[in-house]
Image (cartoon, grey):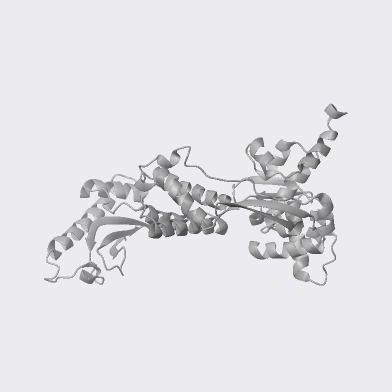
Amino acid sequence: MPKLNFFLKEPKSKEKTLVYLFFSYNNKRLKYSTGEKILVKFWNSKDQRAKETKKFPEYPEFNQRLTNIVTTTNNAYRKILNDGKEPSNKLLKDELDAKLRFINKEEKPTLLSFIDRFIEENKPLKSDGTIKTYNQTKRFLNQYSDEKKQIDFQDINLEFYNSFLAFMINKGYSQNSIGKYIQVLKTFLNAATDRGINKNFEYRNSKFKRISEQSESIYLTTDELDNIYNLNLERDKQLDKVRDLFIIGCYSGLRFSDFSQLKPENFIDENKIRIRTEKTDEIVIIPQHRYVRSIFKKYKNQVPPALSNQKMNVYIKHIGKIAKITKPIETSITKGGKVVRETKPKYQLITTHTARRSFATNLYLADVPTITIMKITGHKTEQSFLKYIKISQEENANKLLNHPFFK
């Protein structure tokens, strides 16, 4: 039997809150805004109607409205059945909209409330890292709104863009970090536009763009990877496991979110790894390097258990130091509007993402066709792939020495 209930949207609100209809039928449930609002203190949750009190003199009309909605909902459900159709939320909603003469009167969400809703909707669909970036972006927009100016969809224009950039620069963030948050804001706006909530398209202006600069990202040479692989770490089991998992990443080209989740069933034909990647939801098939096969056997056809990305990064730097990967690397980054230059030993720049970059760069230097590498890394264009790999001017010259043109 279908069951119908009314619930308040925000039962702890001090302001008027919407009354929602919940209609349960055939193991389904329709959530529908009645368009009616009421103060919580005037609501009788047991009877699911307004309290009969002189302090809320309009209670007779309010309650009659809810009673009419009950009748209309039940009639709509019967009509769909009588028409020989399978009841669905869409069919029921269309019937209710037509009979009740209104289209969901719930207030249009603000930019910041829409972002909250969007993040909640995407928690089951996106990685923890993506949700963390969404929340960081939301936090900065809230800070801007509190410290500078209240913002909503109609305020997102080039004036806001320039003001937000200055706001983030003054807080000391790098260009690449700021650019990442601009890109996420555009993701929010695109989602709101697709749903018909946002009608302001100034964020699509070519000047409203993600800023970035070339950061000093390293890769590890095959000799350096050999040194790491051959380290005797038996006295520290945790370092041993981290090293082995990192090596799998270096010879598979997978992101941390993928190589840390490898299962025995991903290792096929004793020669290949087959996995559906988390970020792109595409299947990639990768030949197993001899180091990968050796590590797989070492753990009795398993892979080492993964730590968090943050902890892995700490351990990997320590492993790089033990492997004497100490070549000085000069880094340059614009932070807080100023160029900051530092020289660091190479091991301090190693992260889990170094594994994927090392894979792509070492294959490129080994003259593996670019398109073949891109089939594994997932890069869509050769231009984006060539930006991704990291080789020095000297390495580039050495690669060209083997080209027939220079023979």
Q: Is residue 341 left or right of residue 272?
A: left
Give the residue at x 21% y 50%: 100
Count of numbered labels shown in the rendering: 0
Report whether residue 240 is seen: yes
Query: Up-down: is 180 above or below 43?
Result: above
Give the residue at x 58% y 50%: 176
Q: Quadrant of residue 84?
A: top left
Give the residue at x 83% y 52%: 290
Picture quarter with the C terminus: top right
Residue at the extreme front: 338
Residue at the extreme right: 407
Image coords of residue 373 (percent x, y): 72, 41
- Given residues 53 and 210, the one toward you in this image is 210
Q: Is residue 77 left or right of residue 218?
A: left
Image coords of residue 280 (percent x, y): 59, 47
Image coords of residue 264 (percent x, y): 72, 58
Picture quarter with the N terminus: bottom left
Image coords of residue 77 (percent x, y): 28, 52
Q: Is residue 165 left or right of residue 324?
A: left
- Given residues 79 and 30, the one toward you in this image is 30
Give the residue at x 35% y 42%: 199
Residue at the extreme top: 405
Report whether residue 253 is seen: no
